[in-house]
Every structure is written in C-alpha cells, then in structure tokens.
Amino acid sequence: MDWEHEDGTSKQRPALVLSSTNSANSSPEIWVAKFTKTRSDVPFRIEFNRNDPSFKETGLTETCYLYLADARRVPKSRFIRRRGRLPILSAVMVGFMLKQAIKFEMP
C-alpha cells in the first residue's frame, strides 16, 4: 500500500489489514498497520521472523515488525495488491495483542 508518513512523504509498504471483513466491505476506509524492518522496544510489537516455517505465507521477504499502536485508518484505494496472508497462529496472536492494545491506558 502507499503509506503516507507524518512528514508528508509516502512510500509503498506492506501492511496488515486490521478491520473485520464486514467493516472493510461497508466502509471506504480500513484500519491497517504497516510492516517495518526497524525494531523498537515499545508495547504491542509483533515480530515476523523469516526463519519461522510459516513465514513464506506472509509474502514478506525479510524479518520485520508490526506496531499495533501505530495503526491508522486509510482509504481502501491506497491498496495496490494482496501480497500474502497471515498463518493462523500469527493471526490469533495479532488478534489477542490488538485486544490488549485497545485496553491499554497511556500513563
């Protein structure tokens, strides 16, 4: 997808759709989180390691991270193509962490 950065620049990046199928089908915008190779020690970080047996299903090419706290709503028109899918265990982990992130209170 075409990800717009805070400084006004944009870059094509892989992203994970976080919206439910019903929500995605009924709205012009969807919730997504981008994948990045940059590792930061912050809450709600998920690593996708290229050495995991199911990594190939993701369509990613290198170990990368997903930061749920950086998720945002974007227009569906920014999506270019489907790159891959999450293996079932990864999807369950993302769902669990997303629920935790929603409950998280900032100090």
Image: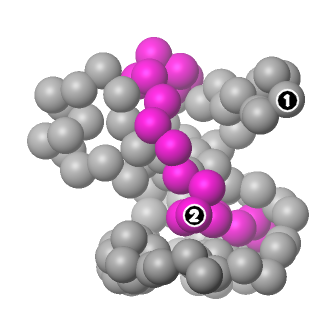
Q: Position of residue 107 (x, y in %)?
A: 60, 82
Q: Residue at x 41, y 24 (%)?
A: 76
86 up-or-down from 26: above or below: below
Q: Residues within 10 Å of mark 1 (few under 14, many from 20)?
A: few
| Residue on which disc 1 sits | 7
Check residue 69 in the rendering and tell me which mark sits there, or answer none. 2
Total marks shown come to 2
Measured Cα–Cα span from mark 2 to mark 1? 18 Å
Q: Residue at x 86, y 63 (%)?
A: 38
The reply, left or right, for residue 89 in relation to residue 22 is right
Query: Which amino acid is tagged 2?
Result: Ala
Q: Residue at x 63, y 49 (%)?
A: 34
Viewer-proximal residue among 65 and 61:
65
Viewer-proximal residue among 86 and 34:
34
The reply, left or right, for residue 66 in relation to residue 31 is right
Is residue 79 highlighted in magenta? yes
Q: Residue at x 23, y 50 (%)?
A: 20
The reply, left or right, for residue 21 in relation to residue 49 is left
Q: Which residues are magenta?
A: 63-80
